[in-house]
Amino acid sequence: MAIAMACHPCVPATPRVGPGNAPGSSSRPSRAVLGSAANVTRWQETGLSSARNNARSFLNLVQVRNRRHSTRHTRVWRVTAAASVPFTETADENETGQADTQAGSDPVVAEVSNPQNIKKSHGALQFFGVKNGLLGVSQPRVEEVMHQALPVMGGMASQNVLNLADSVMVGRLGTACVASVGIASTLNFVCQAALQGISSGVQAMSARRIGEGRPEIAAVPLNAALVACVMFGVPMAVGAYVLAPSIVPRLTSDAAVIAFAVPYLKARLIAVPAVGVNFAFRGFWNAVQQPQIYMNTLLVMHFVNVTLSLLLIFGCVVDVPLVGQIVIPKLGVLGAGVGTTVSVYVGMVMYLKMGFTKAKEMGFASAKPSGDDLKTLLSQAAPTSITNLLFATGMTCMYWIVGKLGTAETAAVNVLINLMLTLVLPCMGMGLAAGALSGRALGRGDVEDAAQWPWDVSKLTAAMMFGVGFVAVLIPQTLLGFFLTNQEAISKATLPLRFTGVTVAFDAVSVVMQNALLGVGDAKKVAAISIGTQWFLFLPVAYLGVMYFPGFNLNYLWGLYVAQRVAQGFLYANIWKQGGWKDIKV
């Protein structure tokens, strides 16, 4: 179970496309467009007429003027003898400023920036009637955001469906089973959290290399990440596996919950190293603008997970030709854990295969990371990993606090978290897009563009989630009824779910700003805010409320939880506005 256009009026324009430089990305013309001594020599050698040279000079003047006065969305054209045709720039420029003008002539660049993918996002927006921008965000920027975010959002949405499907299946087994999965999943998350920071480190470094015009070494951070996942993931998984029987009883005194939680937790812990590898690949594919690989892999993982979990939870008898009947035992909650672990390893194998086919020319498994590369990766990953570790530990403490209210409340919180993730995880796709777009803009030196992306993405995400949250406000009991059979648990979770629906738009802004800061390498401030609000605000107040105030029930506790998340969003936005992230080197 897995929990642009401001061109000279006389010059027509079409988008310039390049890695990390899709329509609407930058107002800074390339060296190849402005020209150089080497380019002039090349033009003379090919026998171009003086008229074309004059036209080129005129375009240069236009670009210089646009650089000073236009918006970020400059569009570049190359003049030929017949007509003006689009100039497609690659990022692989040499020191003299020369660039290949053939779209897709560099296979790495062709993979990193595929105009066909942008056309697909354009078509989706047209279908929903978005033709002239949205909420003050220009149409080219909306298209670029959706091109970057939609595949990740699709993967996140599929993960939500998986989480909910698993919850529905386990929910048929009873309240104790739902509570056990919630506790065990949180403990498993503690182990995974230490490796999750590697994803943001890989994304920040690889996106910066793409923005710098060095795609041939973009996979070096990924190579370093895979080494780190094995070094840290295996010992953590082994240690947690051995300690699982002694840890679970500290969080609940319900014997039935303990009996279900321990085997499930052990099954999930086997996949911890593979989870780290998958996180590293997710950061890399997002950085190089190939998030569809992440989505496609996740869909296969989910299919394997749901199929195996369904068979192993409830058991069945399968007739196989020439073999006879195969009896699949009914494993209950343990079957859900086994199904998830197998699916994680399937995903890891797929990612490795795609790495050899899609990222080989970016240095995957061939460019050896240096000591400095590993040091930079760990320095980028450490704050996020520590933040996630403390966050996961805080969630474990929350389950311990809620457990003092009762088993029904524990089961209710597990479902509430899954439903909250259903609302929030798609926002992470938008946040990852904001981080990748800002990181690439910084890589090419366009600080203004980098600063604007998270604000644009936040507006789009908040508007999207407002309508989704409204559904949770209107029909909370209907939604809860799919996952809980105990009416007491449903009653206790109703008002908290409404709280989630009301605040999800603010939570969306928090997720976008958090991932934007991680995308540009400002992980330390993200860690400080996440740790501070959780450990020095939410958990102490929740503990005191449950222990010393008899009327402090789940409504108050969950209301405090969502208020904490909203407060984080305001703090992240303020940090982004201050702009200290502009000077970070990765």
Image (tube, rainbow, N blue to C red):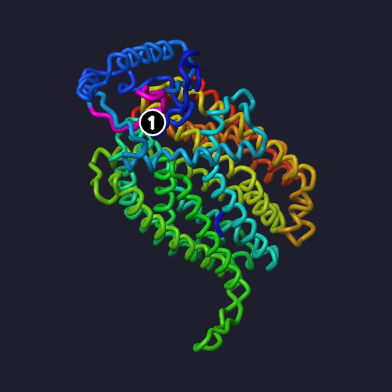
Q: Is residue 336 left or right of residue 28?
A: right
Tell me where residue 123 sits by quadrant.
top right
Q: Quadrant of the C terminus?
A: top left
Amino acid type at circle 1 is Thr
- Residue 144, x across and y down, in percent: 51, 33
Q: Is residue 52 visible?
A: yes
Q: Nearer the viewer, residue 429 or 328?
A: 429
Tell me where residue 203 sits by quadrant.
top left
Q: Residue drawn 42% across and 25% down? A: 581
- Residue 186, x across and y down, in percent: 55, 53
Q: Is residue 585 left or right of residue 398?
A: left
Q: Is the residue 579 above or below the residue 412 in the image?
A: above
**Neighbours of disc 1 within 10 Å: few (<14), some (14-19), many (20+):** some
Give the extent of the magenta segment.
77-94
Q: Is the residue 234 above or below the residue 397 in the image?
A: below
Is residue 486 one of those drawn in magenta? no
